Amino acid sequence: MKVELDPDSAREPIIEFRKAGYRLPNGQALLEDLSIAVGRGETLALLGRSGAGKTTALKLINRMLDPSDGEILVEGKSTLGWDAIALRRHIGYVIQDIGLFPHFTIEQNVSLIPRLEEWPVERIRARVKELLSLVGLDPDTFSKRYPHQLSGGQRQRVGIARALAVDPPILLMDEPFGALDPLTTGELLKEFRQLQRRLQKTIVMVTHDVGESLLLATRIALLDGGKLAGIFSATEFLSAQEPLAAAYVANFRMYEEAERANEPH
Amino acid sequence: MNLIDFFIRHQREIGQATLEHIWLVGISMLLAVAIGVPLGIIVTRHPWLSKPILGGANIAETIPSLALFGFLLPVPWLGARADRLVITALMLYALLPIIRNTSTGISSVNAAVREAARGMGMTQNQILFQVELPLSVPTILAGVRVATVLTIGIATIAAAVGAGGLGEFIFRGLAMVNDQLILAGAIPAAALALLADFILSLLERRLRPAQS
């Protein structure tokens, strides 16, 4: 698969996979020969079934995993040349189970990295307020609460606020809108799209949801069995000939057809 | 009413012996926590060390206390004084529950919490001291509680090697076939165990983090 850049973000790539692969110690390959360049400000969706290598690819970006083959460049530098801690603080990370710290208040959760980076207290307090408002949570109501006092959707918002704390240029999201009821997911998606336009982050997100990909992503990278099956823009994806992409689209269209079938004649 | 009279008449000696008892148990427990918690952390970091460390602590646990005193007697510095000997033995008994609960506490921290911590760029030490240990405190305290209650009981045997404590009364009572003397040792020892259990369980509940 040749390296291709999104035409309207043909600026310098901020993340670049070069023939990257990851194998388990027992030799089983989870990801093979992946080459993609992600332009600054772009949102790339990694779409595929469970076990397709999406999360593996994501974890290679912030050195949660190191590649067994090839390399991944972040800001033009191989991840192996980055200090893992510095790299991770340069990249926001949101996972499906969020992983809020249960013994910290919302404020402490959001301010963890600024505190580790020894920001002045006043700046931290202002930043927490700003972030909570940004993700649609009232700072006065939520700052002092603990994670278990929040609903799933609210916790997910806190997870996003926490990932944005030190204003990293890159955001990695592993099924951030999964595990919520569909209405909550919908609301969150809508708000996140506005947030995305405002903040202009480079985002790589793992998803198995076509709607979510079409809504948020500038491009969709389709993974199948640890290999890249194709890279598409939203319009390309909807008319793609590639069998797996076509299957996803057909599945997605099923809902529209159901709607049409139920229209009164 | 005889017994109460006896307690009142001998309150100074009983008080003295209780303080000795608390001292022996207290020092042993401090040492056991100081050694057991780091060992528990090591076990979670290096799984291959878990067999030798937990195995060793397990063996110490199974040696009868009188025999353990006997084994420690010829050890140069330790055997020289009864209190050193007893404190070492008591500490060895207390180690197992503390090591085991520390490692259980740390390994039962939610995987998502640990992954988020790592992914956000916390160092291993920051994860240990700010996330894993605080979340394990209740489990570790539960181990300390079990160990303390166990140690308070075993410490009565310390009198056999002349380290004092409430065991003095029990051994003297046994020798003189005097029930009141035996009870003068046994009742305060039981009360101490209950009290320690109560206080530590209170602490444990207070420090339990909110459930997510």
Image (cartoon, rainbow, N blue to C red):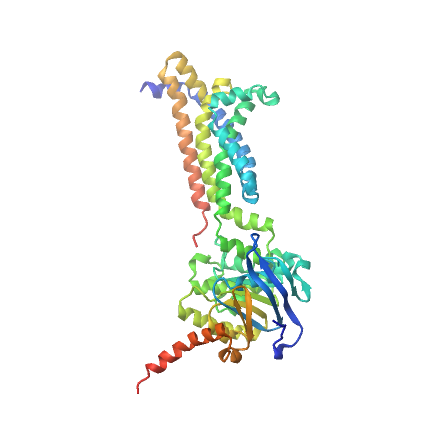
Q: Is residue A36 left or right of residue B165?
A: right
Taking the spot 49% from the left edge, 34% from the top edge, the residue there is B96
Percent position (x, y) of residue A154?
A: 45, 64
Residue A35, how many percent across, how many down?
Answer: 62, 68
Residue displayed at 41% across by 37% down: B198
Nearer to us in this view, B191 or B127: B127
- Image quadrant occupied by the C terminus of chain A: bottom left
Would you place residue B72 above or below residue A162 in this image? Answer: above
Residue at 48% across / 54% down in the picture? A102
A17 with respect to B95 (left or right): right
What is the quadrant of the N terminus of chain A in the image? bottom right
Q: In the image, is residue B25 above or below residue B173?
A: below
Q: Where is A77 relative to A42, above or below? A: above
Residue farthest to the top, as pictured: B176
Kindly tell me whether residue B120 is visible in this rendering.
Answer: no
- Name the residue at 58% across, 57% down: A23
How many numbered marks, from 0 up?
0
* Residue A70, horizontal then vertical, whole percent: 65, 62
Q: Nearer the viewer, residue A132 or A77?
A: A77
Q: How far across and how far down the image is residue A159, in percent?
A: 51, 62
Is B99 located above or below residue A193 in the figure? above
Asked whether, in this view, residue B179 is left or right of residue B29, the answer is left
Residue B20 seen: yes
Please name whichever residue, A130 or B93, is drawn nearer the observer in this view of the structure.
Answer: B93
